[in-house]
């Protein structure tokens, strides 16, 4: 987001000139604030800057944030609402054992730094001693205890909807065991990755010293952890490979699993970590990673294994312990993201509470802050977007009638979830006790959630479940359920405002809806059919045409330099970039359809909104969604770890493929934002 395109020598669209056309305006801007427009920048030169420079100047980064944008404003608003709800629970003196009491206990313990500082590392010392004192011939017992209770050393496993039959659960085994996540942090020797790697070593040492280990022991643990995690990284998927879902669908008979990876006691693994009988078949998503885990588990020394487990244990516990653990984590965060100040304690406390009892808080949230009228509006808006996407499918020149028919079948089968789930989680069996330490209570809650997941095994998939809490400021598409989900938290301005113009709402939440719908047809979503099963419903010719177009879009983003010498990763962000473009195009069609039904001529003087045409307002509010400031360190971090493009590129690169945008702002080949028609990529 450091990129600022030069002002075009041609058309300069001044606010004064546009306002001169505003006589007779029937509507006024609600989500957009025209005072934020930078009229020294032409829309055709840098549309992101034109719309957002004023916002960025008036919302400078504070030390708490690595980045701050419109999403953060909504998140802040949601946090304030949740804070008030939780504090009200405390004031009501809830009865012990009730869900309200559990919510208040977690929040108040998270706020009680005096108790945590007095306890120090005490809550974890018995478990660290258990790791240290485990006999050499009981390392399998130790591995199973760790995996079943505290962490996922070497690899991860668990049930999820089957790729091949989304009505049932399959057992998945996937590579993991690396606390840094991305393999480049371990393997790349460029300046950025080396800096993060060194900061990670410092973190390990600091936390082990906080846990009571001497310097020499902490140094040894650092060396052994880095040896193991670097070895795992060598066989981990690249960022680009991690998006190839078809390559991850590797069913394997249980007998073959035992034969191929004999260093792992699979017979005991499922019984003792999940409480289930060994499955007949498993899906090994990353065979090379599991082979490396098998090799390490069969060759590492007792000391190396124990040091690795010690770190995995301390790392998962550190955020629930004393301030010295918190500070060590923060020192690492400063290097990774550039953030300069810890988030306020109450925000960290809320995050922990919502992570523990999120739907309990969500039920309170929607009862107070999400009216039925907002849900009703969204239902109609979604159907308008569904119709528009159907029109786009019909008009595609590169797709055959046979594949179009299948695409329509999938589109019509979309399940839509708006606001909040139809049934709420029952937390009555979760043990939260004020007499226990904060860490012990969070661990009990974690075990409750884990047991809930494992209990799904052998049962039909519950299609009513939500993957986000209602107060979350986000949305998602789940290909295995073929569903689009819009929590109540995102249904606020500038995304959605019942008092805003249709142009603003379609350019806001309308694009979000279209974005999630398009995910059903992006490079990953297209692999799944109307029922959420991984099925090839494309003709070979259509699949080839899609792949060529997608590669063209990836190439456009690959050329964007986000920092000196650092380029965007078009392949890694491909799904989101396809969805951004599709969302914009589909939402505009739906907006035009809605205005036709109302008999509104969007090109008439009467349709102007504070001096802007409705089409201009639509694109301006889309750009407004991605207003934000960001630190260079966070640009590097997100470019390496986030499947979403940076906000500036979600606006400027995406819009350069959309002809109606050029028409709305009279952008010509003389303007930097212009892209020749032969170079544009249009997929959906």
Image (spheres, rainbow, N blue to C red):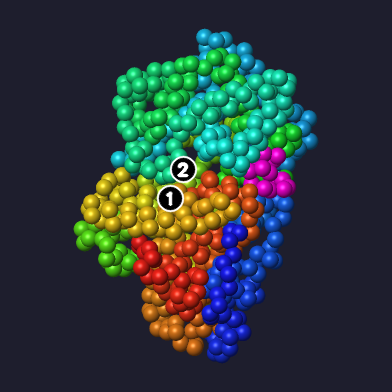
Which residue is labeled 2 in the image?
239
Q: Residue at x 56, y 84 (%)?
A: 18
Kindly state the secondary structure of the residue where label 2 is placed.
loop
Marks 2 and 1 in Cβ contact (< 8 Å): yes
Q: Residue at x 62, y 24 (%)?
A: 223
Which disc number belongs to residue 571? 1
Q: Is residue 439 left or right of residue 582?
A: right
Residue 179 in view in this figure: yes
Farthest-out residue, left? 402
Q: Residue at x 42, y 62 (%)?
A: 581
Q: Which residues are magenta?
A: 330-344
Q: CA distance from mark 2 to mark 1?
A: 9 Å
Residue 485 in view in this figure: no
Q: Is residue 300 magenta?
A: no
Q: Is residue 399 left or right of residue 499?
A: left
User: Across the whole image, how many numbered discs are drawn on residues?
Assistant: 2
Q: Residue at x 60, y 81 (%)?
A: 15
**If the image is split into quadrants, where does the C terminus sit?**
bottom left
**Front-lying residue, 118 or 630:** 630
Q: Earlier in the sequence, mark 2 or mark 1?
A: 2
Q: Is residue 56 left or right of residue 678?
A: right
- Looking at the picture, how far across and down is residue 587, in whole percent? 42, 68
- Looking at the picture, how far across and down is residue 652, in whole percent? 51, 65
Which disc number belongs to residue 27? none
Q: Is residue 334 magenta?
A: yes
Kindly state the secondary structure of the residue where label 1 is placed.
loop
**If the image is split into quadrants, where does the N terminus sit?**
bottom right
Question: Badge 1, how many Cα within 10 Å: few under 14, some, many 20+?
Answer: many
Q: Is residue 636 above or below residue 272?
A: below
Q: Is residue 388 above or below residue 449?
A: below
């Amino acid at each position: 987001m450091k990129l600022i395109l030069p002002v075009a020598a041609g058309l300069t669209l001044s606010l004064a000139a546009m306002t001169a056309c505003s006589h007779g305006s029937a509507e006024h801007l609600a989500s957009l604030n025209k005072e934020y427009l930078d009229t020294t920048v032409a829309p055709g030169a840098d549309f992101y800057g034109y719309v957002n420079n004023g916002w960025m100047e008036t919302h400078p980064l504070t030390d708490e944030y690595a980045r701050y944008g419109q999403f953060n404003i909504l998140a802040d608003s949601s946090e304030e609402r949740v804070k008030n709800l939780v504090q009200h629970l405390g004031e009501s003196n809830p009865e012990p054992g009730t869900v309200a009491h559990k919510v208040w206990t977690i929040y108040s313990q998270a706020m009680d730094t005096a108790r945590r500082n007095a306890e120090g590392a005490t809550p974890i010392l018995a478990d660290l001693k258990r790791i240290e004192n485990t006999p050499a011939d009981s390392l399998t017992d130790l591995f199973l205890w760790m995996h079943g209770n505290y962490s996922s050393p070497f690899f991860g496993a668990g049930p999820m909807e089957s790729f091949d039959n989304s009505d049932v659960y399959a057992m998945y085994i996937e590579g993991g065991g690396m606390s840094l996540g991305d393999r480049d942090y371990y393997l790349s020797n460029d300046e950025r990755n080396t800096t993060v790697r060194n900061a990670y070593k410092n973190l390990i040492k600091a936390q082990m010293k906080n846990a009571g280990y001497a310097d020499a022991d902490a140094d040894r643990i650092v060396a052994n952890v880095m040896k193991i995690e670097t070895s795992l990284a060598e066989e981990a998927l690249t960022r680009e490979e991690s998006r190839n879902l078809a390559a991850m669908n590797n069913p394997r008979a249980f007998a073959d699993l035992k034969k191929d990876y004999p260093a792992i006691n699979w017979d005991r693994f499922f019984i003792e970590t999940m409480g289930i009988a060994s499955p007949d078949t498993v899906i090994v998503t990353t065979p090379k990673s599991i082979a490396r885990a098998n090799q390490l588990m069969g060759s590492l020394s007792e000391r190396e294994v124990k040091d690795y487990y010690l770190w995995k244990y301390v790392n998962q516990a550190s955020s629930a312990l004393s301030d010295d653990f918190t500070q060590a984590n923060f020192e690492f965060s400063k290097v990774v993201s550039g953030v300069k100040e810890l988030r306020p304690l109450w925000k960290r406390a809320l995050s922990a509470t919502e992570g523990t009892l999120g739907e309990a808080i969500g039920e309170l949230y929607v009862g107070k802050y999400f009216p039925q009228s907002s849900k009703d509006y969204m239902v109609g808006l979604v159907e308008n977007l569904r119709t528009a996407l159907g029109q786009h499918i019909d008009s595609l020149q590169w797709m055959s009638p046979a594949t179009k028919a299948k695409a329509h079948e999938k589109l019509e089968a979309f399940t839509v979830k708006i606001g909040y789930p139809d049934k709420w989680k029952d937390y009555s069996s979760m043990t939260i006790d004020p007499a226990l330490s904060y860490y012990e209570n969070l661990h009990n809650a974690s075990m409750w959630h884990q047991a809930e997941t494992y209990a799904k095994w052998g049962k039909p998939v519950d299609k009513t479940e939500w993957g986000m809490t209602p107060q979350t400021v986000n949305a998602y598409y789940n290909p295995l359920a073929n569903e689009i989900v819009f929590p109540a938290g995102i249904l606020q301005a500038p995304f959605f405002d019942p008092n805003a113009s249709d142009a603003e709402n379609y350019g806001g939440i309308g694009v979000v809806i279209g974005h999630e719908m398009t995910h059903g047809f992006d490079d990953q979503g297209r692999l799944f059919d109307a029922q959420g099963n991984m099925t090839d419903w494309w003709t070979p010719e259509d699949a080839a045409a899609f792949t060529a177009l997608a590669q063209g879009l990836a190439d456009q983003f690959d050329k964007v330099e986000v920092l000196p010498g650092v380029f965007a990763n078009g392949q890694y962000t491909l799904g989101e970039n396809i969805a951004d473009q599709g969302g914009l195009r589909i939402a505009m069609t739906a907006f035009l359809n809605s205005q036709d039904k109302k008999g509104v001529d969007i090109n008439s003087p009467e349709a102007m909104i504070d001096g802007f045409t409705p089409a201009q307002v639509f694109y301006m509010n889309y750009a407004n969604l991605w207003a934000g400031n960001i630190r260079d360190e966070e640009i590097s971090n997100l470019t390496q770890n986030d499947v979403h493009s940076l906000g500036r590129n979600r606006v400027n690169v995406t819009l350069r493929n959309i002809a109606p945008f050029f028409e709305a702002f009279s952008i010509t080949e003389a303007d930097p934002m212009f892209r020749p028609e032969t170079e544009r990529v249009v997929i959906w």
